[in-house]
Amino acid sequence: MKILHINTVCGTGSTGRIVVDLYSVAEEKGHECFVAYGRGSAPSGINSCRIGNDFDMYYHALMTRITDKTGFYSTSATKNLIKIIDDYSPDIIHLHNLHGYYVNLEILFNYLTKINMPIIWTLHDCWAFTGHCAYFDYADCDRWKTGCFECPQKNSYPTSILLDNSKWNYEQKRKLFTSPENMTIVTPSVWLAGLVRESFFGKYDVQVINNGIDLEIFKPTPSDFREKNNLADKFIVLGVANIWDKRKGLHDFIELSKLLDESYRIVLVGLSEKQIKTLPRNILGIERTSSISELAEIYTAADVYVNTSVEETMGLTTVEALACATKVVVYDATATPECVDADVGIVVAKNDVAALFDAIKSIKDKKLFEKDACINKAMLYNKNDKYGEYLKLYEAR
């Protein structure tokens, strides 16, 4: 079987790593894969090509900021993508993130509808069924259910600094995205699947396949992280994010730091240099690491992993921490609680910093939860098993 993946990136970021993992698992089973991606570069050994170029991407981003019509530029790049698809002649097309300033939705979906090829579309966020944003829970907005307008997040990604075309975007997406007949929607959580069924995607088969992690990498990994950072005698409270914004809860960690005494130390991974300079003294800030093995070392060194994000389509970092035998505390928000049970961590009310503190203190003082239970929970997300579910889905199409 020949499988063609389309995603913003290949091999980097969470979705890029998922694409490469899917690619690897499928090829191990004798299938052939190809990845078409919108920005950056692909790892060596991956049969792939970039859609468009930097100039096209920057122009698309610029026009989005002016018109709020992201996904309706990149005309030449998308016509080239269609030629690539025709030349490769796949049996299945697997769509991932189509936002990111690299593809023209109208051209692509008119083509996909015409060829009537089996399509799997994994939604890694909510962008596909809104008129603008990738996440709306934080803004307490449900206009996507009936038709977006006057978007309260116009200035958030994909940022528009002038016009609000959320109503037009919503109608265009609804028309284009519901035109293919032979399409299955996949989400990484029950929470997101429920939203998708409420959206204009409701006519399609919606299946849940959790994102998987590499248990050969994410496992208890000893290191000198504590000694190197003068944390040998500290109870380490860890947070990890690709980008620390309001949605990810950086402010809550800063408030939490005011409640913790000297026996604790907060460690945050993924901060910008500017953010690190503003941190209180009991928070150790670390810039984003491209080394997954280094991340596993930091997870292992921590005593508790805290996920303060209020919007997650699964909560992959929580599972990565569990795989490294680290207990967890998460907010009762969106999909993250699906990764946690009473044997491995504590779920507290969203944005309740006092409850976060109480949960962390209970884990420290009462020595709650066994490391083996954390590892066993993470084994449910073994990438070979999870992505094996995709192979079954491909074969069923």
Image (cartoon, rainbow, N blue to C red):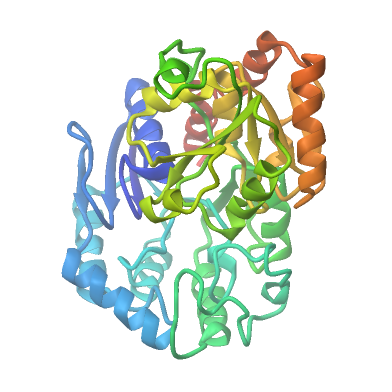
Please name whichever residue, 80 or 366, is drawn nearer the observer in this view of the structure: 366
**Quadrant position of residue 345:** top right
Q: Residue at x 36, y 51 (%)?
A: 273
Question: Is 334 positioned to the left or the right of 295 in the image?
Answer: right
Please name whichever residue, 253 or 148, is drawn nearer the observer in this view of the structure: 253
Q: Position of residue 214 (x, y in %)?
A: 45, 23
Question: Is 85 positioned to the left or the right of 335 in the image?
Answer: left
Q: Residue at x 58, y 51 (%)?
A: 250
Q: Position of residue 377 (x, y in %)?
A: 67, 20
Please name whichever residue, 145 or 83, is drawn nearer the observer in this view of the structure: 145
Tell me the quarter of the image containing the N terminus: top left
Question: Is 231 positioned to the left or the right of 200 in the image?
Answer: left
Q: Residue at x 60, y 16 (%)?
A: 325
Q: Residue at x 70, y 35 (%)?
A: 260
Q: Position of residue 192 (x, y in %)?
A: 67, 51
Would residue 217 be visible to someone looking at this image? no
Q: Is residue 218 above or below residue 193?
A: above
Q: Is residue 317 above or below residue 177?
A: above
Q: Residue pushed farthest bottom?
A: 163
Q: Position of residue 56 (x, y in %)?
A: 21, 71
Would residue 151 be visible to someone looking at this image? yes
Q: Is residue 227 above or below residue 62?
A: above
Question: Is 89 positioned to the left or the right of 113 in the image?
Answer: left
Q: Give the number of callouts.
A: 0
Q: Is residue 271 above or below residue 300?
A: below
